[in-house]
Amino acid sequence: MPSQQPEIKIPNSKEFSKMVVQLQKELKVPMMDTVIHYCDRNGIEIETVAKLLNAKIKAQIQEEAEDLHFLEKTSRLDME
């Protein structure tokens, strides 16, 4: 008999991004840490979930990385 693999539901980008934002609110940590935590907890490679993040979350992670000097700062307009 073939062994049954557990069914894994992969959310779309909108669902996943919403889930990550909610997790960030619960954990009260930077977005970068939230994504890493989600991946560790669910045994998923970061490269896999990167495709599911929306542009707003990617921009937020980039800004956090620039503030921590992980990336060179890019020019941006202050929209506030």
Image: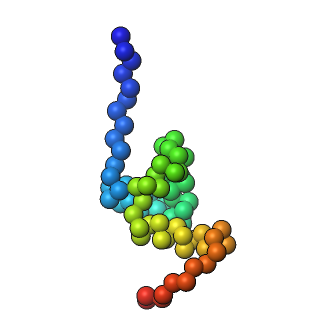
Locate residue 37, reporting x and y percent: 53, 52
Q: Depth check: give the residue in front, 56 or 74.
A: 74
Nearest the eye: 74 or 70 = 74
In this rendering, position of residue 71 left or right of residue 58: right
Query: Visible in this render: residue 63?
Result: yes
Residue at image position (64%, 75%) is 72
Residue lying furthest right: 69
Residue 73 picture location, percent across and down: 61, 78
- Up-down: is 65 above or below 47? below
Q: Can you tell which quarter of the image residue 66 is in?
A: bottom right
Residue drawn at x 56%, y 60% is 33
Q: How many marks?
A: 0
x and y percentages locating residue 25 in the rendered image: 44, 64
Q: Which of 78/19 is in front? A: 78
| Up-down relation of residue 11 to residue 78 (above or below) | above
Give the percent coordinates (x, y) of residue 62: 54, 70
Q: Quadrant of the C terminus?
A: bottom left
Is 28 on the left-hand or right-hand side of 20?
A: right
Q: Left or right: where does residue 11 sit relative to residue 44? A: left
| Residue 19 appears in the figure | no
Q: Name the colour scheme.
A: rainbow
Considering the image in quadrants, where does the N terminus appear? Answer: top left
Residue at the (32%, 59%) spot, across then down? 14
Residue drawn at x 67%, y 72% as measured from the top left: 69
